[in-house]
């Protein structure tokens, strides 16, 4: 019934139906679930509670005859004063000349509009004579297109609820409605469109927030279960004692968080299902050590391992650090685009003939001519830098190898369990002992000379510095310090006493590598760069990170950049040069100076920017929810996730009739199948 075309609703003709289709409304069910995108609440509140630039409603007494002035073509401005709680408030109305005759001195009026707290002024969008109603009136506002108006749409929804409301099926078992105090689906639909009061609207929103999260989590976890079952027979029987001995030979002890993550990864290797795990850890938290141990475990099970990283210089660094950790326990090779000719052929032949246990490389690892003898374990570092296709190609190099993705971009748990719903997530949220915190300062551009003097002093003590800018070359549109201009400025300032290097995204890979190698060897003391240095290069001697126009970066990106320093035993500094105009920008700078914890920053960034911006809209893969908001409703998300786990672990969709409607919904989504038990 509800799947019928929307044209069946009384009052919706072909033309209207066509316009609704342009808004994604095709069926009667689509219409019922086309919720308002916001609500205007007309409720009189005390002046002390009004927030600057918010839409507000006030009630007061007209103090003077309105004065009317005209400007432009047929445009008018009407102004008068109103007494509200013994305070004089100025009211301004545009293009309402007729109101001059309606408003008399002494009249009580209710005004709604934009509040200016500094001027004690309201720019009126709605007014009515007489006092406000005792209860708040809530006006739903829909997102509409073309000739569809809010009034027209509301009327159509009202008709649909009256004529088809009884056919709305309840998806949630009655136990859930009772224990979570949720309204039924039809009552929640009515309250979303025609809320009788704030309370009813709040409960309706709670209901749909939970429902959306539960359906999403069921979907993700069912798909995951199906995927897992397709990869049975994938157990790696590693030698636990050898792994213990390997760890004991490390020059340092693992932190509790490293230990916990390692145990989760080893359990995955041992299990009959293919690993699909995300390992998150702040810059410097010791992900590489955990990855090395996991690679070693796989080798003791007579498998080959691969570590794929986004850049050649990073591959080189991982290759060197793994060689140091492994000693003569494994044969490790480096395979990048620079390895060519005879040497490449020799390496490819050694990989295929099982003379090599670990291959470290860039995307050169996934080229067609690379064949492994028995690839059992794949680690992809900075996984967001690789496309889905590239990751898939590498997986296909082995017989369903276990895959571990690593990232130093701290993703809040809230987002990790949603965006990476088909992955297990391990978190290293603890720093190794004895690591010095990076001191972070926020300053304005007029202190640049002092910063340059500070850099010079540190360089004389044998240290190095990064200076980061947002743009490569000058832009008319944005007044931002660009890398090329800044590079010339610094060359001139330091004369020839200090070598300055320049790196940006338009350089070829070889050129970038060359500049980076010069910096790593301390042939260049100050590196001016755009954000291309963000990922993983290790220069322990670099102790200063200066970020120009820092307000143009998100918190997580600033934190990633800051993590390029502080890698040795010397005290390191991060200097943010910023003059943010808005409150959000100022808040960001303040947070950066207050904490070095990447996960804390990521949570804050998420609150300031929202999930779309956090991941970057295009590649985020974040689900679209009509009502739910992953940031503000994260508790509901956790609850829904746990409930979905319970439902699937107990096979309730299959065995309990009260879950029948949920099962039908999953079948309609095309992912539910009886093969699950």
Image: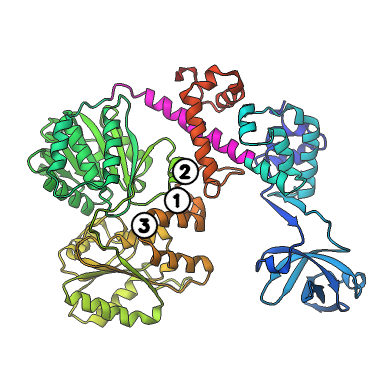
* Marks 3 and 2, the one that precedes in the sequence: 3
* Marks 2 and 1, the one that precedes in the sequence: 1
Viewed as shown, does residue 218 lie left or right of 288? right
Work out how far the residue at label 2 is from the one at label 1, CA to CA, in angstroms.
Answer: 8 Å
Q: Residue furthest front?
A: 179
614 to 189, vertically: above or below: below
| Circles 2 and 1 in contact, beta carbons < 8 Å | yes
Write down the quadrant of residue 345 in the picture: top left
| Circles 3 and 1 in contact, beta carbons < 8 Å | no
Q: Nearer the viewer, mark 3 or mark 2?
A: 3
Q: Secondary structure at mark 3?
A: loop
Work out how far the residue at label 3 is from the one at label 2, CA to CA, in angstroms.
Answer: 26 Å
Which numbered disc covers residue 621? 2
Number of numbered discs overlaid on the protein picture:
3
Visible residue check, residue 567? yes
Front-most of residues 153 and 127: 127
Write down the quadrant of residue 436 in the picture: bottom left
Segment colored magenta: 207-234
Which numbered disc covers residue 597? 3
Viewed as shown, does residue 584 lie left or right of 63? left
Residue 232: in magenta span: yes
């Amino acid at each position: 019934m509800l799947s019928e075309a929307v044209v069946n609703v009384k009052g919706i003709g072909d033309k209207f139906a066509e316009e609704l289709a342009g808004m994604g409304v095709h069926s009667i069910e689509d219409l019922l679930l086309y919720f308002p995108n916001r609500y205007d609440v007309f409720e009189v509140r005390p002046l002390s509670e009004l927030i600057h630039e918010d839409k507000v409603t006030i009630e007061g007494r007209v103090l003077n005859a309105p004065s009317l002035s005209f400007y432009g073509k047929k445009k008018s401005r009407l102004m008068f004063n109103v007494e509200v709680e013994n305070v004089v408030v100025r009211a301004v109305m545009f293009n309402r000349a007729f109101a001059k005759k309606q408003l008399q001195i002494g009249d009580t009026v209710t005004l709604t509009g934009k509040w200016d707290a500094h001027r004690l002024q309201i720019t009126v969008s709605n007014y009515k004579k007489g006092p406000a109603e005792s209860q708040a009136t809530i006006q739903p506002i829909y997102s509409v297109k073309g000739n569809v108006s809010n009034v027209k749409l509301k009327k159509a929804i009202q008709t649909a609820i009256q004529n088809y409301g009884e056919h709305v099926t309840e998806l949630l078992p009655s136990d859930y409605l009772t224990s979570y105090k949720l309204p039924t689906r039809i009552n929640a639909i009515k309250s979303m469109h025609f809320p009788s009061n704030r309370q009813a609207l709040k409960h309706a929103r709670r209901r749909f927030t939970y429902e959306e999260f539960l359906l999403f989590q069921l979907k993700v976890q069912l798909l995951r279960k199906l995927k897992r079952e397709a990869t049975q027979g994938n157990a790696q029987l590693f030698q636990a004692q050898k792994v213990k001995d390997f760890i004991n030979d490390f020059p340092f002890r693992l932190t509790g968080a490293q230990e916990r993550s390692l145990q989760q990864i080893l359990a995955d290797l041992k299990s009959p299902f293919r690993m699909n795990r995300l390992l998150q850890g702040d810059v410097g938290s010791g992900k590489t050590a955990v990855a090395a141990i996991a690679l070693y475990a796989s080798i003791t099970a007579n498998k080959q391992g691969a570590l794929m990283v986004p850049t050649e210089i990073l591959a080189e660094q991982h290759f060197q650090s793994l060689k140091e950790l492994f000693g003569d326990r494994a044969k490790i090779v480096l395979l990048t685009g620079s390895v060519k000719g005879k040497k490449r052929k020799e390496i490819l032949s050694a990989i295929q003939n099982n003379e090599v246990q670990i291959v470290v490389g860039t995307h050169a690892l996934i080229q067609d001519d690379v064949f492994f003898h028995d690839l059992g374990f794949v680690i992809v570092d900075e996984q967001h830098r690789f496309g889905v296709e590239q990751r898939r190609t590498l997986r296909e190099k082995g017989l369903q190898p276990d895959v571990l993705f690593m990232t130093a971009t701290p993703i809040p748990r809230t987002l990790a369990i949603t965006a990476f719903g088909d992955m297990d997530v391990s978190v290293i949220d603890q720093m190794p002992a004895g690591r010095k915190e990076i001191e972070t300062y926020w300053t304005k551009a007029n202190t640049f000379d002092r910063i340059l003097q500070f850099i010079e002093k540190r360089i004389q003590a044998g240290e190095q510095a990064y200076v980061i800018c947002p743009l490569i070359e000058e832009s008319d549109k944005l007044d931002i310090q660009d890398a090329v201009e800044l590079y010339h400025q610094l060359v001139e300032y330091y004369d020839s006493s200090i070598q300055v290097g320049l790196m940006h995204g338009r350089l070829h890979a070889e050129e970038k590598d060359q500049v980076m190698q010069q910096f790593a060897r301390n042939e260049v003391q100050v590196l001016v760069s755009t954000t291309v240095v963000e990922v993983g290069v290790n220069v322990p001697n670099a102790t200063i990170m200066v970020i120009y126009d820092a307000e143009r970066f998100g918190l997580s990106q600033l934190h990633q950049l800051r993590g390029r320093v502080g890698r040795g035993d010397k005290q390191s500094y991060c200097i943010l040069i910023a003059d943010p105009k808005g409150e959000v920008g100022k808040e960001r700078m303040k947070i950066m100076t207050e904490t070095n914890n990447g996960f804390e920053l990521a949570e804050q960034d998420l609150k300031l920017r929202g999930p779309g911006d956090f991941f970057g809209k295009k590649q985020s893969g974040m689900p679209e929810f009509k009502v739910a908001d992953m940031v503000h409703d994260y508790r509901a998300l956790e609850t829904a996730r746990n409930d979905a786990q319970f439902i699937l672990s107990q096979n309730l969709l299959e065995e309990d009739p009260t879950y029948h409607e949920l099962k039908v919904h999953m079948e309609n989504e095309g992912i539910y199948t009886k093969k699950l038990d």
